[in-house]
Amino acid sequence: MNVYHVCGGLLALWAVLVSFLGITREDFPGSDGAMRLVGAISIVLALATIGSAIYIGATEKKENGGGEGSNAFVSPI
């Protein structure tokens, strides 16, 4: 488990919570300040998830054991 999984899980939980509140409450989020807060939290969680995915993808080590040219296509025939 890494930071991407944590951020992605938090974003998914946040999306479910906001959806539930939006469906069950007619006046959700209620005020302009609350609307800005919900939007800001959503943006921060999305950017954290995307940023952590990019960072992990760029810094992870290759585990296939191959060198530079190990990405060759292998025909199934």
Image (cartoon, rainbow, N blue to C red):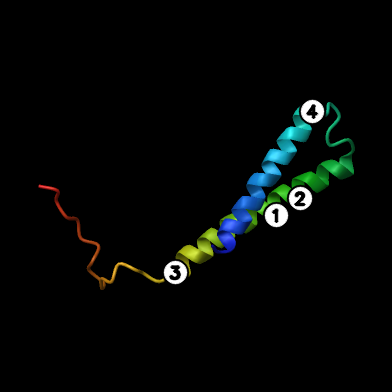
Relative to 72, is 68 above or below? below
Please tell me whether mark 4 or mark 2 is closer to you in this view. 4
Distance from Cα at disc 4 to Cα at disc 2: 21 Å
Q: Which residue is mark 4?
A: 24
Q: Which residue is mark 1?
A: 44
| Neighbour tally class for label 3: few under 14, some 14-19, many 20 plus, Cα within 10 Å | few
Identify the residue shown where x is 51% and y is 61%. 54
Q: Residue furthest left?
A: 77
Give the mark nearest the N terminus, 4 or 3: 4
Where does residue 51 sit, x and y in percent of width and height?
A: 58, 60
Disc 3 and disc 2 in contact, CB within 8 angstroms = no
Where does residue 63 sit, x and y in percent of width and height?
A: 34, 69
**Is 58 on the left-hand or right-hand side of 71?**
right
Where does residue 36 sit, x and y in percent of width and height?
A: 82, 45
Please tell me whether mark 4 or mark 3 is closer to you in this view. 4
Distance from Cα at disc 1 to Cα at disc 3: 24 Å
The label shown at residue 60 is 3
The label shown at residue 40 is 2
Disc 2 and disc 1 in contact, CB within 8 angstroms = yes
The image quarter containing residue 50 is: bottom right
Indicate the amino acid at tag 2: Ala
